[in-house]
Amino acid sequence: MEEIYNKVLDRLRVLCSRREYCSSDMLKKAAEYLSGYGCEASEVPDTAASVLESLRRDKYVDDLRYASAFARDKASLSGWGRIKIGYALSAKGIGRDVISEALQSIDPEQADSRLVKMLLTKRKALEGDPQSRLKLLKFALGRGYSYEEVSRAISRLDIRNSGSDGTE
């Protein structure tokens, strides 16, 4: 059994050295690998928890580090807002306090700038549509931005391009 434990632990260490993982992902992977190596089904949950604890102790897995990296990446690369990022992290089983701290790592000015760029691109696609303002609002809300953030950004676009697309 110790041989299987060490194989799984080594394999997961290699995965963790390549990218960040959260505790729930590593727990699932540990259980999968233990089952794949022939570990008895009754021993899998406890052994997987032990593997996860070892990974945490050796700093291979850190939910705050994972959540912060996830939040920064989704905000800057995918253009997600704080709300959508929070829900995604919550779905991964990460605690509210960790999520809250991770969301602090998002640069608000950069996120606002990203939102405005996305809205400009979307606005061009909706040119001439009488409901473009509503569609822009729904689009940005779907990306996980708050109503206040979206309203401010759309107002700034309207001021910058007042009347150029026929929405006002």
Image (spheres, rainbow, N blue to C red):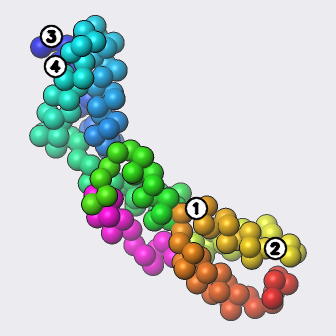
Q: How many marks?
A: 4
Q: Give the side of residue 9 with respect to residue 33, left or right.
A: left
Q: Are marks 2 and 3 in contact (CB under 8 Å)?
A: no
Q: Quadrant of residue 134?
A: bottom right
Q: Earlier in the sequence, mark 2 or mark 4?
A: 4
Identify the residue under disc 4: 6
Q: Nearer the viewer, residue 96 or 61?
A: 96
Give the SS element for disc 1: loop
What range of the chain is rendered magenta?
98-114
For badge 2, the amino acid type reads Gln
Q: Are marks 2 and 1 in contact (CB under 8 Å)?
A: no
Q: Earlier in the sequence, mark 3 or mark 4?
A: 3
Q: Give the side of residue 158 with respect to residue 20, left or right.
A: right
Give the SS element for disc 2: loop
Q: Nearer the viewer, mark 3 or mark 4?
A: 3
Q: Earlier in the sequence, mark 2 or mark 3?
A: 3
Q: CA distance from mark 2 to mark 1?
A: 19 Å
Which residue is at a point 21% across and 15% down the rendered structure image? 43
Identify the residue under disc 3: 1
Identify the residue under disc 1: 143
Q: Residues within 10 Å of mark 3 (few under 14, many from 20)?
A: few
